[in-house]
Image: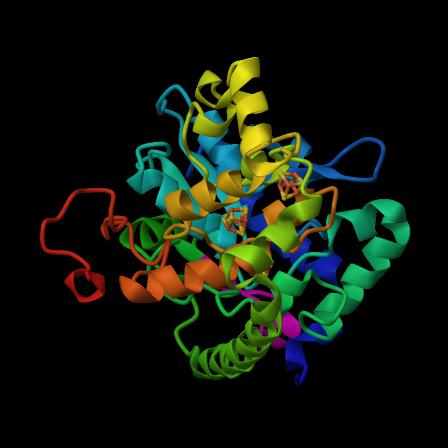
Amino acid sequence: MSAPKSTTTGLKKRENAILDLLKKGLERKCFDTVLIPVKVPAGDSYVWVLAQDNSLLDDASPLPPVMPVHGAKAISSVMRRGKGRKRIATVMRPCEISATIELSKLGQVELDNVFLISIDCPGVLPLSDYLENPKKGGDAFEKVFKQWGNGSVRPICQVCHRFSMPTGASDIHIGMLEAGERDIFIISNSPKGEAILKELDISPKKEIGSWKDKVKEITEERKNKRKNLQEELKPGVVGLDRLLDTFSKCINCHNCMRVCPVCYCRQCYFDSDKLKHPYEDYLFRAEMSGGLRFLPDTLLFHLGRMAHMSLSCVSCGSCEDACPLKIPVSQIFGLVADETQKLFDYIPGRKTDEPVPMATYKEEELKEVED
Ligand code: SF4
Ligand code: SF4
Ligand code: SF4
C-alpha cells in the first residue's frame, strides 16, 4: 500500500493540533467538557477522561496507540442514567463513532448534547503487543503514521475499510491523509459541526478532492485485503463442527462480550440464572452425550451473541483484543457481520435515522430466505 504524502510530520504534532481545537472550544464555551483518552500515570495504558478544563487536556491523547476501552462504551457509560444539560465534545475513531450511532438508535446514547469529532484512523496496535513493551509500542505507532496503517496494527485494522468518515455520522471530521504540512484539516459534516466551526473562526476545508481520492484508494485496497483474509478464515470457521473446534479453547470468560460496544443488553441472558441448571440436569446431559465440558454452553454463547448483535457489529476489534486465548473473535464476527449487514443493505453507524434491522417486527421481511 502506498504511503500518503502527509505522514512525514509526527504524531505529536497532529495530536497538538487536535488538542488546540478542543481547548479553543472549551475556552469559547462551544461545549462544556471533552471526553478523551488520557495516558495513565504508570504510562502503559490509556483511559477515557471527562476533561472540563484546559490543563487536563495537556495530558490527553486523541490518537492513542491502543484501544483498551472502546469510545462508544465510554460515552454510553456517561449516559447510562440519561443525558444531562452539559455539552460533551469527543474525538473518536470511525469504529467508535459508528458504535455510538448504533447505541443512540438503541436508546443508550443521547446525541443532542454530544459533538462528535471523527478522525482518519491508521488503526491501533494489538493491546497485548503494546503492553509487553509500551515504549517500543509507542515507537511502532509513530511508524504507523509514516506508513499508513502498516503491518503492526491489529489484523482487523489492516482490513478496515471504514477507517475514515467522509459524510454523515460525525459533526466534524479531522482529515490527516493528504494534509501536507498542515498536519490536519477539518471537514464539516453536519449543521451542528458548521455552527461550532463558525464560533471557533475555523474555515472547513472545501477542496477535498485529493483526500477523497486517497480515502477511496485505501478503501479499495482494504476491501480486497478483507476479502482475502475472510477467504483464508472461512475453511476454519464455517460450519458448526469447525466453529466448535475454533471456540474449543474458549474459557467462557465473556470478556469479548463485556468490551463489545454494541453488546448493549443491560442484563445478559448468558450471565443470568436462566443458564444455571440443577445438578441433575448436567448429569443427564453428560449421560446422554457421554460427557459434558465445563464451563458449558460456550458455543451457544457465541452463536447467541452473533444472532443478537451482528447487524450492529462495527468490526472494531475490541473483542479480539480482550480475548486471553487469542481467538480471532473480531475476524469471525466481522465475517458474519459482513454477510448479515449485506442481507439488509445496512451499514452500522452510516446514518442516525436508519433503524437497526430486525429491531422492529416486519411481517414482510426476508421472504427470499423462507423455505
Ligand atoms: S477498526 Fe481499527 S482502523 Fe478501523 S476505525 Fe477502528 S481502530 Fe481504526
Ligand atoms: S463483536 Fe467484536 S468486532 Fe464486533 S462490535 Fe463487538 S467488539 Fe467490535
Ligand atoms: S474472550 Fe475469548 S475466551 Fe473469553 S469468552 Fe470470549 S472467546 Fe471465549
Q: Is 280 placed left or right of 201 in the picture?
A: right
The image quarter containing residue 204 is: bottom left
The residue closer to the viewer here, 25 or 115, is: 115
Q: Is 358 placed left or right of 262 in the picture?
A: left
Which residue shows up at 36% across the image and 32% down it? Answer: 108
Task: Provide the residue span drawn in magenta.
Answer: 173-187
Which residue shows up at 67% across the image and 69% down it? Answer: 149
Quadrant placement of the N terminus: bottom right
Tell me if residue 182 is in the magenta stretch.
Answer: yes
The residue closer to the viewer here, 166 or 59, is: 166
Tell me if residue 326 is in the magenta stretch.
Answer: no
Badge count: 0
Which residue shows up at 62% across the image and 77% down it? Answer: 180
Check the image and tell me how it is coloured.
Answer: rainbow
Question: Can residue 62 be seen in this snapshot?
Answer: no
The residue closer to the viewer here, 72 or 184, is: 72
For the view shown, which residue lies furthest in the left direction? Answer: 363
Residue 199, x across and y down, in percent: 38, 47
Quadrant placement of the C terminus: bottom left
Question: Can residue 313 be seen in this snapshot?
Answer: yes
Residue 105, x across and y down, in percent: 29, 41
Residue 190, x across and y down, in percent: 31, 56
* In the image, residue 147 above or below residue 257: below
Residue 234, x across and y down, in percent: 56, 69
The residue closer to the viewer here, 5 or 3, is: 3
Which residue shows up at 47% across the image and 26% down it? Answer: 78
Query: Quarter containing ligand 3?
Result: top right
